Amino acid sequence: MRYDLKDLSIDVNDRSVRRDGSPVRLPDLSFDVLIKLLEEAPMPVSVSEFARTVWRAEHVSEETVAQRIALLRRALGDNSKNPKYIRTVRGAGYAVSESAAPQEHEPAQGALSILAKRPGVLAVTAATSLVLVGFTIWNARDVSTIPTTASETETSKTTVSILVERARDQLRLHQARETDRAITMLRDALTQDPEHFEGRMTLSFALSTKATKFGGDAAVEQEAEAVARLLIEERPDSSNAWSALAYALGSQGRVDESLHAYQYAFQLNPMNAPALSSAAHTLLLMGELHQALLLEAKAKKAGGSSRYAEIQIAQVLELIGHPATKKWYNEALTLNPAQVVILAVIARSHLRRGELVDALKILDQAEGDDRSAPQILQLRGRAHAALGNFEAAYSAFEAAGFNAHYDMAALQALSGDRSTADALLEPAKLSKLDADADAESRVQYAEIAATLGHNADALRFLSQAVNLGWRDTDWLKQSPFLGDLMTSPEGHLLEARIAREIETQRRLIEGSEELSAMLGS
């Protein structure tokens, strides 16, 4: 399906936009907003309708939708005062400036041709499109490799395996909507083959990813755990199943249980270095820096490999001021050039040292779709906020979505709009925080409280963060929202408390012969 709107050509299946043949790059959310406008043309789309069909939420503020429309207009080169593509309909929402007739594709594969010719199918979701593409590729490539005696079950399993691999490709994009699409694909695959072990394991990981990174609710967390536990019942010696359980437990804040499950996953398979590295990351978040490095050393000694081992080692070393810090950051970047998580951690390192321009340069190294990865956009927004570029910060936070929800609330409060920040600090919201063992969430709440002028509450949240393992004083001092608070007498006391904890960890690390051999100097 393709739409033509003046000089724009919008391809639904390819999720691409071209102006006079030249590509126009849009983030996923902006593209979905554009498609919704085109589907409903010439009628306007209300804020509530955008919330229901695009944001998939019960409520989205008018300001959030207005900001997304502004970003979309900016990307298209449109002007709200003299709109070429998108007009504001007072009291009704937004609409395209003129009707845009859909143009039919003529796909070679029968399944896609049937879909394209079905009347009224204007909103083919990316998840459905990818499922159909999975069937098409299988039909084209794999039929000839299957013996003529193959059963229907064998054929179904081949198809399901393809869908599972495509879902994994979606998960690697580290984006909210791509994660939702992966979950949809996995559910479709498991409808065809409910016993597919790898499919169920991938679903557990996908649900935990949604819960930890994109705001999944308790039901999502519990389903991820339930799926993982069923896998373990079937194959109690599956290291990856135990890793899936550990991830699910971690998403619920059950840190100790998660840590033990990761360690057992490694015990089952000493080549499962990612499991031990994940356990090390859990210890890092708990402030157990010495123990975290010991696990990384154990994984390296066993001969396994983990993509994030070097970057996590660098994070620990930076916190204790170790001279080998730069060496490990460089090694991480060399082994994983332009990888989103690596770039995000290095950019965060620059931010905590107040090197804002350098942080932006690192973030600019992200390539393709990774440039709109939520963690990249969130850090870009924080850099701009610290530079005083509030408009750029607002755009970055809004594009980052859930990842920057708390940053957005703090920035809005600084700009005079306290509504979101006040809502987050309501007693009903804070009561749920008690069950959350994540130290960084306390720092985020402290930033919001500080922007509202509730310094006592902010200090209480920061004290809780330190109790839970927060050990990064520089991040607090360079925060665009906590700067004044950290220069107060109470802030200095908090800084001194963290320094004492860091000194203890530094002595443990420097006194370890095993770690000295691994770290060098």
Image (spheres, helix red, strand yellow):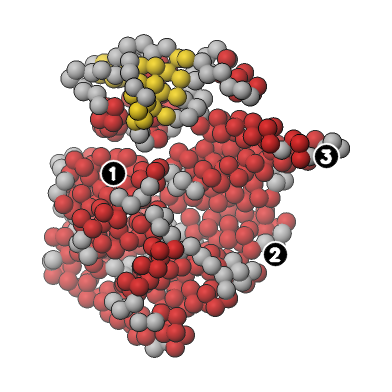
Q: Residues within 10 Å of mark 3 (few under 14, many from 20)?
A: few
Please state which of residues 498 and 430 is positioned toward the viewer in this rendering. Answer: 498
Calculate the distance from the C-alpha at mark 2 to the C-alpha at mark 3.
33 Å
Which residue occupies the extreme front position in the image?
Answer: 21
Kindly identify which residue carries mark 2: 237
Element class at badge 3? loop
Of the numbered discs 1 and 3, the one sitting upstream in the chain is 3
Is disc 1 in contact with disc 3, using a CB cutoff of under 8 Å? Answer: no
Q: Type of residue at label 1?
A: Phe
**Residue beneath the point at 23% across and 18% down:** 83
Q: Is residue 150 left or right of residue 281?
A: right
Q: Is residue 202 left or right of residue 472?
A: right
Kindly identify which residue carries mark 3: 147
Please state which of residues 47 and 365 is positioned toward the viewer in this rendering. Answer: 365
The circle drawn on residue 195 is: none
Element class at badge 2? loop
Image x and y of residue 519, in percent = 41, 79
Q: Type of residue at label 2?
A: Asp
Kindly identify which residue carries mark 1: 397
Nearest to the eye among marks 1 and 3: give it.
Answer: 3
Q: Type of residue at label 3?
A: Pro
Query: From what the image shows, is residue 63 above or below residue 121?
Result: below
Nearest to the eye among marks 2 and 3: give it.
Answer: 3
- Say which quarter of the image contains residue 474: bottom left
Q: Residues within 10 Å of mark 1 (few under 14, many from 20)?
A: many
Calculate the distance from the C-alpha at mark 1 to the C-alpha at mark 3.
53 Å
Please state which of residues 419 and 404 is positioned toward the viewer in this rendering. Answer: 404
Please state which of residues 67 and 348 is positioned toward the viewer in this rendering. Answer: 348
Image x and y of residue 497, in percent = 25, 75
